[in-house]
Structure formats: C-alpha cells, structure tokens
C-alpha cells in the first residue's frame, strides 16, 4: 500500500487535534470521570476506528482493511493487559482521583510519540533485513510462554520502578506533595523541584514503551504496512484512558486474560516465523532459498478469526468462572483486589 505524503500529514494533524482537544478538556476541569462520560468517549473512539477501517477497506482493498482491524484488535487486547500495571502505578504513587485521567493522558501522548519512533525503526529494519522476522517471531513465542507461566503461577502483579524513573528521582530534587497538574514547583531559595505528577507521567509513558516491545512486533506479524501499524496503535491508545476507568473493576474478573494473550502472541509469533521461512535469505537455512510451501503464509482472514475467537472465549470463560468464585478465590487467581474506591 503506497500511502501518499498528504495522507501521513493529514493523519498526524487529525491525531494532534484529537489529543489536544482531549487534553484541553481534561486539563481545564480535572475530575474523576463518570461511567457515562467514559462510555461516551470510548464509543466515539471505537466508532472512529471502525469507520477508519471501513475507509481503508473501500479506499485500498479488503486485505488492508482486514489487516487494520486485526492489528487494532491485537493492540487493544494487549493494552487491556497493560491497565493492570497502570492501576498499580496509580496506587503506588497515591494519585488523587481527579488527577488520574490527566496523568494518563500525558503519559499516553508520550507513549504514542515513542511508539511512532519504534515503529519507524522497526519498519526500516524489516525493509532492509527480512531475517528480522525470525527475531520477532522467536521473541513473541518466548514472551507467550513467559506470560502463560506467570499466569499459571498466580503471581501478584508488582510494579518495578524502571531505571529512567529511578534516575530522575535520584538526580533531581522532588517534593512529595501534590500541586495539581504542575510538573515543577519552586522550593527553598526559588530552586525548582519536580512534583509527583511529573514522576507519574514519566512512569506511565516509559512503562507503556516497555509493553510496546511485544505489541509492536505482534502487529508487524499482522501487517507489514507502517501506516496501518501506526494508525492501529493510535486508535488503541485513544480509548485507553476511558477504558482504564470504565472496566477497572472488571479487570479483576478477567482471570484467564494472560492465557488468551499468551496464545495470541504465540500464534502471531509462529505466523512471523513462517513468513520468515517463506521470505528466507539466510544462507545457512535452506541454502539461502525461500520455502515455497503455501501453508507457510497464514491468510489475514484466518488471523482475524483466531484473534476474535481467542478474545471472545477468554472473556466469556473468565467471566463465567470468576462469577462462580468467591472473593477470596478471585484474589488468589488474579492477585489482591484493589478497591477502586480507596485508590
């Protein structure tokens, strides 16, 4: 798909406008959003993603339309898993409820900028070196087994402070008091001090980038088009803030989410590895020749069916089983319950 320059420019411009509008609305009146507000915004963002996918289908072809929808669903499902860590971060830093969505918004914007850079680097590597698909595939299969193992061990979610946040806290004077949306305040002798808000924003943005280490290779397993990879990430991140507030309590009932995501990552990892074999140029594999077996190329419609079926079965089974569990059993399955009202 040869995307004209003006389409890239228009996409970036519309994205900036949407996020700026959202940021201005949130920043002007910090508050804890209601369920109705979250559902309304989330419906708008999901609707925009669907309209965009239909537009891709009509403007280019159904293949690219299916690739966008598949990639968007993968990114969205992986983002839901990320919300567990976001909840822990908010609790760890005791972020006031009325400031949580502002912190999330800035963190998501940071994450989107860093993901765009990551996508550009990944696309350039793929264009130059087809063997990168081997690495992506093996990494996703490894991540899948790791995720499934963590789910089987019923380990509590723990947040480990990343090195960038630790560096900021260690090298710059900070205040433990919240000052609304301010990132810097004047301390003794007019010396600037960083606030907890700045630390939380850096934590959210950089933590999401770490999650992108598996989500970006995963979507490259769905589509090789950088434009679709980027737009799928944009639409997945657009509704992430509302999703955080809307299904915060429901996350505790998705007890098999890690298994479903592990299967998806495994499936896409195998798909990437098959594609690498089909496009093989490494001299020590098959003498540097391609593997021409048609079954090595998994069609996009089959990928979409697998993605939808996995998400539906995971959600339905999780809700059914957790509905028959006591609170103590659910805690044992997903980790300690975090009371949404006491964060």
Image (cartoon, rainbow, N blue to C red):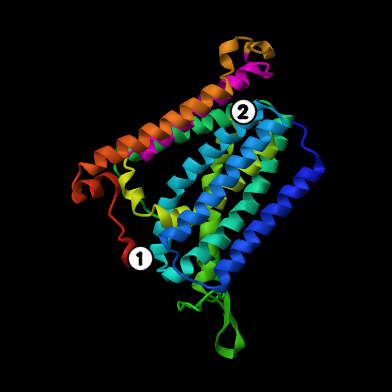
Residue at position x 40%, y 38% in the image: 147
Residue at position x 66%, y 30% in the image: 64
Residue at position x 40%, y 69% in the image: 94
Question: Dot 1 surroundings within 10 Å: few (below 14), some, or many (20 or more)?
Answer: some
Is 126 situated above or below 253? above
The residues bearing labels 1 and 2 have C-alpha atoms spaced at a distance of 42 Å
Looking at the rendering, which quadrant does residue 127 occupy?
Answer: top right
Camera-nearest residue between 321 and 221 = 321
Is tag 1's residue or tag 2's residue first in the polypeptide sequence? 2
The region drawn magenta spans 256-285
| Residue 209 appears in the picture as rendered | no
Helix, strand, or loop for circle 2?
helix
Helix, strand, or loop for circle 1?
loop
Does the stretch in magenta take in 266?
A: yes
The x, y position of residue 271, in whole percent, is 54, 24
**Tag 1 near tag 2, CB within 8 Å:** no
**Residue position marked by numbered label 2 in the rendering:** 133
The x, y position of residue 146, in whole percent, is 41, 36
Q: Quadrant of the N terminus?
A: top right
Camera-nearest residue between 81 and 278 = 81
**Residue position marked by numbered label 1 in the rendering:** 343
Looking at the rendering, which quadrant does residue 62 occupy?
Answer: top right
Q: Quadrant of the C terminus?
A: bottom left
Looking at the rendering, which quadrant does residue 244 occupy?
Answer: bottom left
Is 223 situated above or below 153? above
The x, y position of residue 136, in whole percent, is 57, 32
Does the stretch in magenta take in 200?
A: no
Give the overall secondary structure of the magenta segment.
helix
Most extreme residue toward the right, as rendered? 5
């Amino acid at each position: 798909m040869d995307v004209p320059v003006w389409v890239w420019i228009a996409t970036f411009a519309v994205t900036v406008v949407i996020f700026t509008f959202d940021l201005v609305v949130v920043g002007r009146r910090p508050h804890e959003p209601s369920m109705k507000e979250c559902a309304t915004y989330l419906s708008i963002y999901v609707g925009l993603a669907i309209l965009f996918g239909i537009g891709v289908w009509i403007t280019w072809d159904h293949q690219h339309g299916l690739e966008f929808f598949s990639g968007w669903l993968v990114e969205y499902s992986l983002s839901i898993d990320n919300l567990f860590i976001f909840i822990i971060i908010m609790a760890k830093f005791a972020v006031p409820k009325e400031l949580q969505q502002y912190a999330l918004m800035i963190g998501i914007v940071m994450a989107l900028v860093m993901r765009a850079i990551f996508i550009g680097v990944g696309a350039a590597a793929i264009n130059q070196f087809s063997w990168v698909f081997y690495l992506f595939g093996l990494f996703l299969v490894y991540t899948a087994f790791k995720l499934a193992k963590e789910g089987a061990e019923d380990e509590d979610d723990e947040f480990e402070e990343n090195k960038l946040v630790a560096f900021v806290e260690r090298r710059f004077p900070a205040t433990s008091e919240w000052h609304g949306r301010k990132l810097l305040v004047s301390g003794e002798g007019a010396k600037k001090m960083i606030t907890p808000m700045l630390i939380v924003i850096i934590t959210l943005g950089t933590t999401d980038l770490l999650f992108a280490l598996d989500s970006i290779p995963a979507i490259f397993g769905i589509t090789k088009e950088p434009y679709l990879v980027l737009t799928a990430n944009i639409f997945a991140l657009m509704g992430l803030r509302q999703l955080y507030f809307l299904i915060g309590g429901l996350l505790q009932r998705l007890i098999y989410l890690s298994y479903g995501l592990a299967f998806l990552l495994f499936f896409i990892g195998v798909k990437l590895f098959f594609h690498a074999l089909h496009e093989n140029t490494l001299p020590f594999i098959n003498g540097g020749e391609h593997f021409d077996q048609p079954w090595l190329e998994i069609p996009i419609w089959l990928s979409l069916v697998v993605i939808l079926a996995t998400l539906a079965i995971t959600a339905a089974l999780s809700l059914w089983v957790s509905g028959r569990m006591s609170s103590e059993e659910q805690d044992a399955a997903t980790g300690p319950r975090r009371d949404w009202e006491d964060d």
